[in-house]
Amino acid sequence: MNDTASHAHGRIAAGRRWLADYLGLGLALALLVLVFSLSTRHFFSLTTFQTIANQIPSAILIATGMTYVLLIAGIDLSVGSVLGLCTAVVGVGLAQGHWPAPLAILAGLAAGLAAGAFNGLVSIRWNLPPFIVTLGMLEIARGGAHFLTRSQTQYVGSALAPIVETHLLGLSLPFLLALAVVLGSQWILTRTVFGRYLVAIGTNEEAVRLSGIDPRPIKIAVYLYSGLLVALAAVIDTARFESANPNAGSGFELQAIAAVVIGGTSLMGGRGSVVSSFFGVLIIAVLNTGLAAVGARDETKRLVTGLVIVAAVIVDQYRHRWSQTKP
Amino acid sequence: MPGMTRPADTPLLLRTAGLTKDYATRVLDSVDLEILEGEVHALVGENGAGKSTLARILAGLIRPDAGHIELAGEPYAPSGKRQAEAQGVRMVMQELNVIGRLTVAESIFFGHLPHRWGAIDYPGLHRAARPLMDQVGLSDVAPDRPLETLGVGRQQMVEIAAALSRQCRLLILDEPTAALTAPEIERLFDQIRRLGQQGVSFLYISHRMEEIQRISDRISVLRDGRLLTTRGAAGFGLDEVVRLMVGRPLEETRLAASRPPNGPALRVDGLAAPPALRHASFELRFGEILGLAGLMGAGRTEMLRAIFGADRRAAGRICLRGSSAPARIDHPRDAVRQGIALLTEDRKAQGLLLPLSVLANVTLNHLRPFCRAGGRIQAAAERRAVEQWLDQLGVRCRSPLQPVAELSGGNQQKVLMARWLHRNCDILLLDEPTRGIDVGARFEIHRLLRQGADQGRAILMASSDLRELLGVCDRIGVMSAGRWVATFDRNTCSQDDLLHAALSGYTRTHP
Amino acid sequence: MTIRISGLGGASLPRLAGGAILAAVWILASGCQPAGPSERAEPKPRVALIMKSLANEFFLTMENGARAHQRAHADQYDLLANGIKDELDVSKQIDLVEQMIAQKVDAIVIAPADSKALVAVAKKAQDAGIAVVNIDNQFDAQVLADKQARIPFVGPDNRKGARRVGEHLAKHLRSGDAVAILEGAPNAFNGIQRRLGFEDAMKAAGMNIISSQSGYWETDKANQVVAALAGEHPELKAVLCANDSMALGAVAALRAAGKAGQVRVVGYDNISAVQNLLREGRILATADQHADQLAVFGIEYALEMLRTRGTPADRETPVDLVTAPGPSPQP
């Protein structure tokens, strides 16, 4: 084996993969921005992008957790309901309990972690498919949200305002937090032992077990992380809307999965990237904002969004093949 | 070279001319092959020589880039598996394409089940399956028995019956005996001979030279995509076939220990994990290779998994390194921490992370040496270590970043061995370490094992190939019907002794 | 032997858990069951209230109002209140009506999840001699005519209510100003009525409706739409929301866009969470349909029908315009 050649080859392959991963998504995003800029008056402006940046932090956080979950060949259908539950905890704490904001936030985060712990522990202890366990959690958490709020939207006023009103370089604190989570999670995924284990478990869990690594704590950690990120998203949404609606987050699980899949993460596990999921969220957000700015009819919106999801996955198939071909 | 040993009176069934196929490199290079009616035509060559590609072209699974094929004088260019089967060419795959829950009769007729308005006609199906099953020696099996309840050998017979359910002129068998025990192989050979007399031709692909010599009429040797020669099997010596395949003569296959074994590594007392494993007691010492023989289903895999903590044990003690206190092994994690490694029988499903790089596969369970603060992996150090192992074990790959799926079977097995050596394991449990691996690589792995033992490691190696065990191991244990029944010294035992011991559990009744 | 026990324990734990869940469900279900057989002997009429989504604050308020009313008039009737999980689960609601028919209740007060799909089963109830009153979401007139059914509707005129909210908003705008409408779920009858009411008012005042999109009744979706509109249409002066949850999302979007105070927001329903926003003027107006009384109106009407044995005409219930924090609609 020629050493320098193999090094060069490795670099080329890595570069190719990087290109395939991010260039395609970037181009798709640019294309969408271009289409909407041409078809509306004000779309292409700083305000629009600031607006989008303000709206997507919670979607980014949820998609990041979902990426980890899909990477280990799991699934978390409960994210939307858990967001509702955490929102309810924060909202009831502030509006009914008159708790100080930090306490309410901590309680919300604890609720998210508890939901994640339930998902992880139950599916591992009784060896149940995560699809079933998180489907159960979907109902449990939504029920909990309605139980806590007695189905009434809780008005929290400006108690959490500092979270959304703090800005740095024109970007809101939640957006910066979400960005940090994305970069941190991607770093963990590609550079650390934990990340290596995630990919390995998603690829072949039995092989990992038989190599002497216990996959169970790692899987539990992933569901905990997903729960924590959902809770963070819930705190941000509560702050943005100044209110806690027990129905908040319904349907988020499918949106998150769509964003992650658009980013090219495999539902079969073992392949995925947090940064790509971030792009997936951006694409969906630009699509939503653009279609709303155009004033598209509701059926058009759904049609276009659905087509984009399917098209993205088809393109990803080719993209993946291209990056795998031997140069 | 072609046709020179063709008996003048036997009609030609199939002829290829200039058959060529390119992937990244040339895999088949203008191959001219002739198969006669009713003959068993063996195709030998190292892995990657092009045997499977040739077989897959004939079976209609892939198309050649150049060249053409004639079947019984007519041009033959199947567009797919179905068309090839319609013209009487059928392949029994290396990895059984057995569909789990089907019954025997259903799998024989799968794809063309007799039906009436969409509902399967079961009485008709079972009537039609009966003669086919009798033909391949499955007369004692009920047609509605679930396929998964049969042993691997009999599942193979079902596959052959499936091939016969359509008028078959050429049956391609790719490593048919890889999963079979000796009596099952005998039964398979009987069927092949009988069908041959009825005019069915066989293209028989295998690594097992002695079997090829026994069963085949003619032998074709492929090397690097070229057909080197086709000759009558009689008078075509084993050594010469192997020399042609690898391009160099093989050394003596018996590897002797360079020094006597050291202290005890592993003592197993009364290990049981019913129903497959009933009772096993033995001792393994550092510096020796202990072989493990037995028929399919004798409990060898189950015993190795039980020692390793992969499956639950019902009873028994495992003591390590001469200690008299039993070791606690409840999970593979515990075993590995105490220096035990298990190379699984099915390396693709239970060992490798196929789409991931060679590098990630080697270091999977021992990233600690490259670990910096926060769990960060130091990429350069990891790569250096992996390159050292690849070099030391002679793994052939383009780069440590190449997906391990692209490597040949032998190199994949070496990658797994590198994983365990990197993890500093010195008690190695190996389950069929050379299954599906070509002759050259097989020998290299044997040498690595011997080297490992000489360096003081303890090796327990299960294999279905008695010659391999006799050639490599210092002692050989035999399991039969879930029990460890005998242990032999290799210098004082023969294949017959091992076979007798392996059968003993099925003739005697245990309390 | 020990092995057996541990194996058994491992296998039966999930079964135990399953059993515990079943038991819990049974206890909860039996706790919710209607009056026992001894009470059934009394001649009190039994009224079934069949609601839409109990996950929705609006319907929950309705149901609570009905329960309070029943407690105050326990001598007059028994109440069986049932709801479905979400507003789209039409088939579940049909099942509920059929169960009530089988239970031989005296009257059914129903807020249909679908204005067409529920007509047939409501007619079936009527044919079985049950007094049926339609509340909240009015049955489709065409389908009623096809089935030759006459089912009285008791409820607010959403279109009229929305028009009053719109007319109040118009006083704060100038003719020709750009306004946007946030609709409810596109297939909901009351959503459509409210949109029509908003449109009536805006057209009458000469406003320019630049966009009318669905926010699916949800805060989050409304937020996205309004944020996009605020960017695309800097001339926007007001957003009319078909419910208050969407108004919350609109307020948040305008604040984030730095347009708080420049763009007026109106809502509908007068939920508790908007009281402070009304007081601060961040929501200009909303409409109160007296949600807690809606079901009660229906029940009283059904009792009246049982007494008179006639099929009276529709009855309209009051809608009030709320411009400053009024009395809390729900304790």
Image (tube, coloured by chain):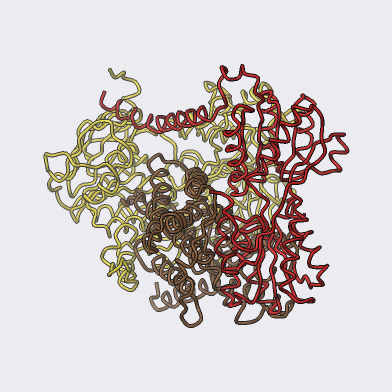
Chain colours: A brown, B yellow, C red
Of A44 and B452, which appears nearest the observer? A44
Q: Quadrant of residue B487?
A: top left
How many labels sit on residues? 0
Of C205 and A198, which appears nearest the observer? C205
Which residue is pictured at 79% across the width and 65% down the height?
Answer: C201
Left or right placement of residue B499 versus residue C311 in this view: left
Which residue is pictured at 88% across the width and 37% down the height?
Answer: C146
Q: Is residue B244 visible?
A: no
Where is residue C143 drawn, in percent x and y? Answer: 84, 40
Q: Is residue B330 visible?
A: yes
Left or right placement of residue B278 versus residue C227 in this view: left
Where is residue C267 drawn, in percent x and y? Answer: 66, 61
Left or right placement of residue B239 versus residue B161 in this view: left
The N terminus of chain C - image quarter = top left
Where is residue A135 drawn, in percent x and y? Answer: 52, 45
Where is residue C296 drawn, in percent x and y? Answer: 66, 39
Of B453 and A252, which appears nearest the observer? A252
Which residue is pictured at 28% across the width and 60% down the height?
Answer: B422
Please tell me whether residue C54 is drawn above or below residue A67 in the rendered image. Answer: above
